[in-house]
């Protein structure tokens, strides 16, 4: 999964344009980056690439191709081949005339590589195979036909952008690509947001389409090489961007933005009421999501049962495929995603559509692939989320589940009231954050942290453990309170931290009993809830806000994971091995 950006035309500084474009899409992968720019006078490609994050600003190494009109760039999330400079994209052919960037996995690359014995491949990537195959195909065809021929041979979900210095050719199956039509310039990118500073006239490539950007823009069906009429859509969207302001890290800033996001959500009842109406009418409702978003769906299962006495199904996106057979045309599939680009969430939506089901998205990014793919998109209204670990988008998802479950039984106002109360409680937690910082100082050297919750707090426990894993690289596991004793209790040692969520609800006595069970084995009990208890070794008060208590509770874990990361010298905005949006299977 990666970010792609390219530009061709009357651009006096294609390199800077591409660099800025990559900044907008670096969330898609930050193992390495690279930019190839074409110098017409010398007739050569200048390629700058390296491991790690994009440099903060364009520095001296980019000089030399300042005035060029063609550049393509890439930010990588490695799938095939280590995180090295050689494996970073763009890749070149043997002649040095072609450069190529790629998003996806060429599933048959080993088989294809066997046909390239006479070629000198330098990297371990599946990507490099493609550019050498195109070089071979160029012996008999022009570039456009050569790319068409080779793209058909690639198995898997792939997007490629290739150039010979005269034109840019891009093709896709699965992974997103959007072309932009500017004034004397044409663009290509993995995310429409990166194009919006330049143009609002966009061509959303469909699967099995190839686009040729030269002086004009030409579109082809990549399966049969037939020319197609491109549909240019003028979108009303604004470029969304977010600065650090007074904060050092986006993670911290976004944790602080949660009360504002919640107030925004509480005011937007119209779409939520519409989705509640769709759930009411549906033959069955199926929620799908990945990572943090999947815990919001699990929460939905509990909330819909408790508040609306309604059964809904849930599956993580990558498993939907194996349990989708009972989806009917009257079913409703609700996909939940921050970025709207996770392939594991998008594929189930396409499958659900094949079954004839109606589709809804709860999604944070306007214009994302998911936003455009469903029958009814609802924006989560959390605002731009840049840190890799989701905080305010997750809170927005939890709040939407609370909102939906109450709207299902006509209690919109109750939902609005408790969502606003949860915003106030988050403000109170933020004011008391130094207690959480002190706790991080006590437990940062631990190798295991366990987190327990029952009922509505079970998804909260799961989400909290993910935050700690992502930000602090400490093994953390969330459990339904009753489950730990069925095996994992064997891992409890003296001083193992166990966080217990204890709201004032029907789970209270049972979860306190679970806390006692692990305390008896030496655990260090961290209690979170409205009331202190003798079993707690550390207590952090979070006032109860009914079913909405699930909204402030994860904020405790967000802050804990943030302070653990700082204590361990880690960058909380860029956890290792991750990308903000997971766009490969
Ligand atoms: N499979 C390619 C690689 O590992 C592309 C990965 C990506 O989409 O970033 O380089």
Image (cartoon, rainbow, N blue to C red):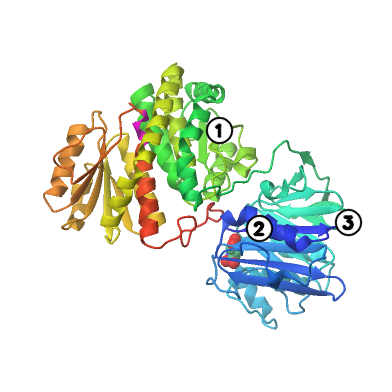
Q: Which mark is residue 372?
A: none
Closer mark to the observer between disc 1 and disc 2: 2
Q: Is residue 550 magenta?
A: yes
Range of magenta residues: 548-552
Instruction: Identify the residue at horizontal 37%, vertical 53% (top origin).
Output: 563
Say if mark 3 contacts mark 2, CB within 8 Å: no
Say if mark 1 contacts mark 2, CB within 8 Å: no
Q: How crowded is mark 2: few (under 14 residues within 10 Å), some or many (20 or more)?
A: many
Residue toward you, 53 or 168? 53
Q: Mark 2 points at which residue?
A: 22
In the rendered image, the residue lying farthest to the front is 246
Q: Which mark is residue 215?
A: 3
Dominant secondary structure, magenta: helix
Where's ligand 1: which quadrant? bottom right
Asked if 516 appears above or below 377 in the picture, the reply is below
Instruction: Identify the residue at horizontal 41%, vertical 19% (top origin).
Output: 414
Residue 447: give x, y in percent of width and height.
28, 61
Residue toward you, 250 or 509? 250
Q: Name the residue under label 1.
A: 360
Q: Earlier in the sequence, mark 3 or mark 1?
A: 3
Q: Earlier in the sequence, mark 1 or mark 2?
A: 2
Closer mark to the observer between disc 3 and disc 2: 2
Give the quarter of the image for residue 27.
Answer: bottom right
């Amino acid at each position: 999964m990666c970010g792609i950006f390219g530009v061709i035309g009357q651009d006096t500084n294609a390199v800077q344009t591409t660099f800025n474009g990559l900044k907008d899409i670096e969330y898609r992968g930050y193992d390495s980056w690279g930019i190839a720019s074409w110098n017409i006078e010398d007739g050569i490609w200048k390629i700058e690439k390296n491991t790690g994050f994009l440099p903060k600003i364009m520095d001296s190494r980019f000089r030399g191709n300042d005035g060029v009109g063609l550049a393509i760039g890439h930010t990588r999330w490695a799938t095939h081949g280590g995180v090295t400079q050689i494996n970073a994209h763009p890749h070149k052919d043997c002649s040095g005339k072609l450069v190529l960037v790629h998003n996806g996995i060429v599933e048959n690359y080993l088989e294809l590589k066997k046909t390239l014995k006479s070629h000198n491949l330098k990297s371990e990537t599946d990507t490099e195979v493609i550019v050498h195959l195109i070089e071979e195909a160029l012996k008999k065809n022009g570039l456009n036909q050569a790319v068409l021929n080779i793209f058909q041979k690639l198995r898997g979900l792939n997007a490629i952008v290739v150039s010979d210095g005269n034109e840019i050719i891009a093709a896709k199956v699965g992974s997103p690509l959007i072309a932009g039509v500017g004034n004397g310039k044409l663009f290509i990118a993995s995310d429409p947001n990166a194009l919006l500073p330049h143009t609002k006239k966009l061509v959303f490539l469909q699967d099995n389409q190839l686009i040729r950007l030269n002086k004009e823009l030409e579109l082809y069906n990549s399966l049969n090489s037939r020319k197609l009429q491109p549909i240019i859509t003028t979108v009303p969207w604004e470029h969304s961007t977010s600065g650090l302001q007074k904060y050092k890290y986006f993670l911290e800033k976004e944790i602080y933005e949660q009360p504002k996001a919640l107030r925004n959500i509480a005011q937007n009842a119209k779409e939520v009421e519409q989705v509640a109406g769709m759930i009411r009418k549906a033959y069955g409702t199926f929620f799908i999501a990945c990572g943090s978003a999947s815990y919001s769906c699990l929460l939905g299962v509990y909330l819909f049962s408790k508040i609306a006495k309604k059964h809904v199904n849930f599956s993580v996106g990558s498993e939907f495929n194996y349990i989708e057979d009972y989806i009917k045309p009257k079913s409703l599939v609700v996909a939940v995603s921050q970025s709207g680009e996770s392939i594991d969430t998008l594929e189930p939506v396409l499958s659900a559509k094949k079954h004839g089901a109606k589709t809804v998205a709860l999604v944070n990014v306007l214009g994302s692939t998911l936003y455009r793919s469903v029958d009814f998109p609802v924006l989560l209204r959390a605002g731009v989320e840049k840190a890799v670990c989701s905080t305010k988008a997750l809170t927005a998802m939890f709040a939407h589940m609370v909102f939906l479950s109450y709207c299902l039984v006509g209690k919109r106002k109750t939902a609005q009231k408790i969502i606003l109360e949860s915003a106030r409680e988050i403000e109170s937690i933020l004011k008391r954050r130094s207690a959480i910082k002190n706790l991080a100082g006590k437990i940062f050297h631990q190798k295991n942290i366990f987190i327990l919750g029952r009922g509505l707090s079970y998804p909260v426990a799961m989400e909290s453990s993910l935050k700690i894993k992502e930000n602090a690289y400490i093994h953390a596991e969330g459990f339904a309170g009753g489950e730990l004793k069925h095996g994992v209790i064997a891992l409890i040692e003296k001083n193992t931290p166990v966080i217990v969520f204890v709201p004032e609800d029907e789970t209270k006595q049972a979860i306190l009993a679970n806390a006692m069970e692990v305390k008896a084995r030496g655990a260090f009990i961290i209690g979170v809830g409205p009331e202190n208890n003798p079993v707690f070794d550390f207590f952090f008060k979070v006032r109860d806000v009914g079913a909405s208590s699930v909204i402030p509770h994860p904020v405790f874990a967000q802050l804990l994971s943030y302070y653990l990361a700082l204590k361990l010298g880690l960058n909380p905005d860029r956890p290792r091995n991750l990308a903000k949006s997971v766009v490969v299977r």
